Image (tube, helix red, strand yellow):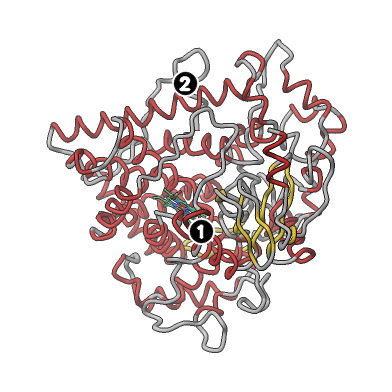
Amino acid sequence: KVIEASRRNKIPTALKKLPGPKGYPFIGSVPDVPEKNGFIKFADWSKEYGPIYQVNLAGTNHVWISSDQIAKDLLAKKGSIYSDRPHISALIDDNRTSAQKFANVIMRESEKALFHRYPEIEAKRMLVELLEEPDRYNHVLESFVARVTCRLAWGRSEASDELKQRTRELLIAVSPTGALGNKLPFLMALPDWLSPTKAWERRRARTERSFFETMQKEVEKDAREKKAPQSWMKIFLDSRSKWDFQYELEGAYSVGMHGIAGALTIAAPMQTFCLAMCFYPQYLPMLHEELDRVCGDRLPVAEDRPKLPFLRAIIRECLRWRPPVPTGIPHSLTQDDEYNGYHIPKGSVMHPLEWAIGRDPSIFPDPEAFNPLRWVEPGWPTYQEPLTQFPTIINCTQFGYGRRLCQGQTVADEDLLIGIGSIAWMFNISKQRGPAAENTSSHSIGMNENASISQEELNTGIEKSKSRTTMEDVLLSKYTYPGAFPASRDEEEEKAPKEAKEFSKFDPANIDPTLDFSTLLIAKPLPFKFELRPRDGKRAERVRKLFQEGCEKGEYTDSREFWGHNQGKGKPCGWGKV
Ligand code: HEM
């Protein structure tokens, strides 16, 4: 290993080493990267070291790219060597199969069928839930996305709560700031009883597999009874032999992973939309005007897309302003390479840093401002015609680069158009008024966090009630660098070692309220207080009636528990409730 590492570090004579921070022995620059909004630190370094630089993080070379052109030159044009994925140490079995041929077909078929109108169907349920319980908006938006994705994947929405939970767990497992095994990889080499993180991952992976198998069986049963609604699983079952899958489970995994990927990401820009409308209120009346002109007294539908450029501009700007994956999803370099006289060693983890790429001032003047007009007013560098097609989120940098480009772009496009369009059609969105708002700059952190951000997400890999001291306890009491101690928001914080607590301390007064995002790989705005009021009683009445009619037709079935009431430990599978 030592020989391999020194070979890797050897730079060919004609080439230079990429610039970057020096870091500390062994752990590299880990202590310099904050857990909260670490992407801003990486963007700051790009101002210091340039649009491509490298950072040693615990012995692995990470290359950060903050220019769209360089990301294209390397990750897309040299796709043959830049398309691997780095190993994720906290995963026991890496089943992230992308099954491209199958993925292309299921996406094309769904798009052709206007996603079977699932987003439009679920938008009505979402609006009624928002009317009933606006405080739970975060939860409601996540449910909307999970239900649509669940229908797309398996034809029905009943498993959407399970899907949400599977999604959260996978997000924890793959996030550098999530499962402890990603920060301290050797924990994954210990026996389960000494490493709760590893035991957690084993349970997570087992539950995920059971979930995917269960869902496949459900669709097989529906198909036998000739009542299977359209879904990706149905496409798989209808023509099993067509796909070059090597093992039986591959279809179940491919469908399941697309379900998870879909449920994971799309709620983030919807939540960002609410945030943006509170802090940039001048744009909501413009959006209302467009929706009223095009849709009148009915909800937006897929066919309205060409006539809604301002809605598309708002959605495009949400993705740029607060990218759902601000650090990008990394690629891995499979052989030594060079760029502009710099050496990039094999095995480097390559990050297209979306946070910085979407803030290049030559392309996005005044990049910190949320400004949808940059997409629809001639004169801005991002303006493009025809406005029936542009702006569009399809192929934007926030979906990645090259061979690993996001496969669910059209699903995201449709969900966001219908989801955000429907919310704007129905509601006024504004900052909270009243005395409480004045005290907190209209921003109340954690208002309904239990409803939307699970404790597992906040306390990743930490076992709450245990009698044994584990290797993790020992490490957590010694390692005090940011990242060693997962942010904690409950009584556990009191018990945390003093020095570790210092890093997990979070002071709402010191943070830009539009930057209070969750810390995992997908960055979602933490729940905040705002006003969500129907624009008029007629619209509310109309949507309630449409939903009622749907219920009568059996369109909206309730969520179902797949593992029984007590899902927790002691069972062969299952984790907490959503
Ligand atoms: C706003 C929503 C979404 C965003 C911002 C997003 C972003 C991304 C990004 C950045 C990547 C990595 C690309 C790269 O490595 O260069 C990715 C990959 C992927 N996405 Fe998405 N995504 C979204 C929605 C979806 C949806 C709805 C689905 C499925 C229905 C999906 C399925 C996938 C899959 C399967 C991959 C892996 C591709 C591969 O490794 O070959 N995504 N996505």
Q: How many marks?
A: 2
171, 162: nearer the viewer: 171
**Residue sitting at x 29%, y 40%:** 154
Hey, what amino acid is under mark 2? Gln
- Residue matched to label 1: 400
Q: Position of residue 453 (x, y in %)?
A: 58, 40
Hey, what amino acid is under mark 1? Gly
201, 391: nearer the viewer: 201
Asked which secondary structure carries label 2, the reply is loop
The image quadrant of residue 564 is: top left
2 or 1: mark nearer the eye: 1
Q: Are marks 2 and 1 in contact (CB under 8 Å)?
A: no
Label 2 Cα crowd, 10 Å radius (few <14 / some 14-19 / many 20+): some
- Residue matched to label 2: 567
Image-based side of 123 in relation to 2, left or right: left
**Residue sitting at x 66%, y 44%:** 446
| Label 1 beta carbon less than 8 Å to ligand 1 | yes
